Amino acid sequence: NAAAIPTVRLTGVDSAYWCETPDKNHLRWVMPYPEEKLLDALARLQAAGSTSLGPDTRLVGSFRAHGLVVPVWDLPTSMTAEDCEKPAAEFFERLTGALASDAPLTAEERRARGGLTNRQVTLS
């Protein structure tokens, strides 16, 4: 099918998929965590400037599919699936730490969370 997006599953983390499109590549990562807890953790990392997967990458939002949140990063066209492996593993470590926090979100983290939820799309 010519419309299919070339996709490669990362091997170093669970359920993360590198996708190649003509304008930029993406990482789509299916996360098994409860939505509210995950969004809080992503907001903590976003506010701390810790969501990057390297130069010219950025967390652009997420979508929900089958009850799971799938964060999406824009990647440069030069970044291959193999290039994503180490940064994804490092991000997973940061995410694990952020998921462990039960502290209330700071004002900056609440703003970051609002930005993440405003860009979220539900796929059915």
Image (cartoon, grey):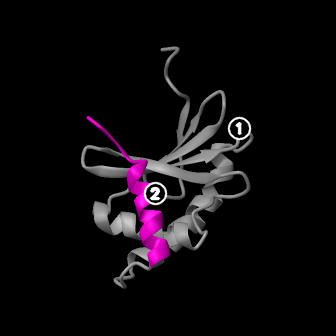
Q: Residue at x 38, y 55 (%)?
A: 117
Q: Is residue 116 magenta?
A: yes
Asked whether residue 87 is in view, the answer is yes
Residue at (54%, 70%) from the top-left corner? 47
| Residue 101 left/right relative to 53 | left
User: What is the secondary structure assignment of the residue under circle 1?
Assistant: loop
User: Would you say 12 lies left or right of 66 here?
Assistant: right
Per the rendering, the mark at residue 115 is 2
Q: Position of residue 9 (x, y in %)?
A: 51, 44
Chief SS of the magenta region: helix
Query: In this figure, which residue is indicated by the disc labeled 1?
Result: 77
Q: Considering only vertical position in the picture, is 58 above or below 3?
A: below
Identify the residue shown where x is 47% and y is 50%. Answer: 61
Q: Is residue 92 above or below residue 59?
A: below
Residue 26: image location, x then y, percent: 57, 42
Residue 31: which quarter of the image? bottom left
Residue 115 painted magenta: yes
For disc 1, the neighbor class at 10 Å (few under 14, some 14 to 19, many from 20) is some
| Left or right: 83 as drawn, with respect to 8 | right
Q: Residue 14's spot in the image, x, y percent?
A: 44, 56
Span shown in magenta: 107-124
- Mark 2 lies on a secondary structure that is helix
Q: Going 54% across and 58% down the picture, which residue do you hit?
A: 12
From this view, report whether residue 77 is shown above or below residue 117: above
* Sequence-first disc among 1 and 2: 1
The kind of residue tagged 2 is Gly
Q: Amino acid at mark 1?
A: Thr
Answer with left or right where residue 76 lies relative to residue 45: right
